[in-house]
Image: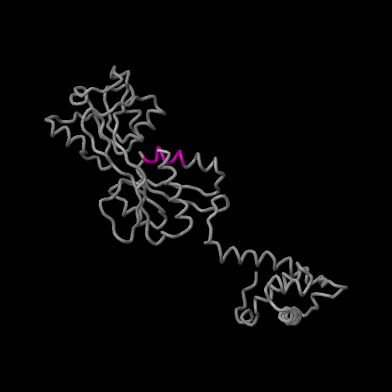
Amino acid sequence: MGTMNTVDLRRVDLNLLVVFQVLCQERHVTRTAVKLNLSQSAVSAALARLRRLFDDPLFVRERSSMVPTSKALAISSRVGPTLASLVDLIFEDVAFDPHRSQHVFHLAMSDDLEMVLGPWLVRERLAQGWAVDFAIHQTSSARWRQALEDRRIDTVVCLSPAERAASFQSESLFSGGYLCLFDADALGVRTISRQQYLEGHHVRVAFDLQRGWVDERLASLGHARKALCTISHFAGLAPLLRSVPAVATIPEHAARALAATTGLATSPVPIETPRFSISAIWGTRTDTAPESVWLRDNLKRFAASM
């Protein structure tokens, strides 16, 4: 492909190509003028300039029609796709089509949210026939700012932050509570009693491997949590809890997802528990981008399904 000569190109009125292509379609000066909202004299003047530009008659009058020459037909076969590409380029932000776009959406979240959002996105992509792709990155609610410093990340899904800078936008998706997750056969029960919870063994899940709200709540009741192990990811719970008489206290969405796929049981937490809110957070710089709006609309659809 040759290098574009911008000096020569500036001498050409590219609107002439639009007139040329419509003439090829209509093969009539008057109809071309009507379609382009121009006068017949303006179309005739454009045709004269086109003939000088391409050094060819381009159209030959036969009866009431303007018949394109062989050179005009050859030019039209190249001009048509070029004009269509220019229209797509200039107006591509008007609408986002997930069925045609090859855009890769990068989302960051903890693995408890990945357990429910990931499968939903995969099912929707197949059901809707989307061409877009999704990449899920691991982060925690305490590190959402650092996650968005990576310019690849479109949106973070995490616990709703207490405050955020003006350079970020957020929207609440859903709220939830906690459930106990355990091996019913190993514990010999289907519902965890208060006494079992206070005196039994626990598996703690904490991204930073530190104490959490359960430890603080039990301490306020005069008990220490008997933690057999602390892990940083929810995905490791199933093999740890299987055949072990212990309980894990985790967000209800993750507890239900794990119970559905591993055969573990769930039970209400027999002490007072806090509630939490999950939000989508993104950079203000992408707030109005069509693909960003589309993604957020679908995150709201996911939240409604919860």
Q: Position of residue 188 (x, y in %)?
A: 29, 17
Q: How is the image coloured?
A: one colour
Of residues 155 and 210, the one drawn nearer to the viewer in this rendering: 155
Q: Residue at x 26, y 39 (%)?
A: 275
Of residues 37 and 123, the one drawn nearer to the viewer in this rendering: 37
Residue 176: quarter of image: top left
Of residues 212 and 38, the one drawn nearer to the viewer in this rendering: 38
Q: Position of residue 287 (x, y in %)?
A: 41, 59
Q: Residue furthest left?
A: 222
Residue 184: quarter of image: top left
Our reading of the magenta stretch's main secondary structure is helix
| Residue 154 shown left or right of residue 202 in the figure | right
| Residue 262 shown left or right of residue 78 in the figure | left
Q: Residue at x 22, y 40 (%)?
A: 210
Q: Position of residue 79 (x, y in %)?
A: 70, 68
Q: Residue at x 34, y 48 (%)?
A: 172
State which quarter of the image contains the C terminus.
Answer: top left
Instruction: Write the start and end of the magenta stretch as one range.
Output: 113-120
Can residue 35 be found in the magenta stretch?
Answer: no
Q: Position of residue 213 (x, y in %)?
A: 21, 38
| Residue 40 shown left or right of residue 180 in the figure | right
For the image shown, how many numbered marks are present on the structure?
A: 0
Q: Residue at x 53, y 58 (%)?
A: 95
State which quarter of the image contains the N terminus.
Answer: bottom right
Can residue 118 be found in the magenta stretch?
Answer: yes
Residue 85: quarter of image: bottom right
| Residue 218 shown left or right of residue 96 in the figure | left
